[in-house]
Amino acid sequence: MILWKSIECDVAWNAGSCTATKDLDAPPGWQACKVVYNLAHEGGFATSKKFTPDNWYTNDPESPDRYRRYKVYISASGSDSIFNQVGARIRLENVGIDIIPATADNAARYAAGCDMPDHD
């Protein structure tokens, strides 16, 4: 399930930093399984990407708990140094999530290759 075509941060060496965030929500009746994307570009002074599960099931009988959302976070920072003029760029394309039925238990999640993050 592709939800966004692309997410990008592109900064010049003296332009500070850029951050972009997106929420990838499973539709009703489904749960999030894992993030899918193509890394189109990543380079320069400093870049990062992070995918965090969110919108956890309440009182879930499965352990680890199931969830319905991924928060996607990317950032890029330029060097901000006249002696080291390096910008940065990160671009993710075809960004989305794999989903499985909301009723799928942990055995089905493992079989589908889903991420199984711990949750308090």
Image (cartoon, rainbow, N blue to C red):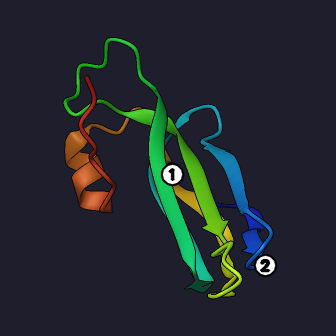
Q: Give the left or right position of residue 48, taking residue 6 as reference.
A: left
Residue 4 seen in render:
yes
Q: Nearer the viewer, residue 104 or 7?
A: 7
Label 2: few (<14), some or many (≥20) within 10 Å?
Answer: some
Looking at the rendered structure, the kind of residue marked 1 is Ile
Q: Which residue is mark 2?
A: 12
Q: Nearer the viewer, residue 33 or 102?
A: 33
* Image quadrant where residue 75 sits: bottom right
Q: How many marks?
A: 2
* Image quadrant where residue 40 sits: bottom right
Q: Which residue is mark 1?
A: 99
> Rounded to the nearest whole Å, what is the CA distance between mark 1 and mark 2?
37 Å
Looking at the rendered structure, the kind of residue marked 2 is Ala
User: Compared with residue 22, is residue 47 higher up or lower down, i.e. above or below?
Assistant: below
Q: Secondary structure at mark 1?
A: strand
- Residue at 70 percent across and 82 percent down: it is 87
Across and down, in percent, residue 60 comes to 30, 19
- Residue at 25 percent across and 22 percent down: it is 120
User: Compared with residue 27, is residue 99 higher up or lower down, i.e. above or below?
Assistant: below
Label 1: few (<14), some or many (≥20) within 10 Å?
Answer: many
User: Compared with residue 91, is residue 54 higher up or lower down, i.e. above or below?
Assistant: above
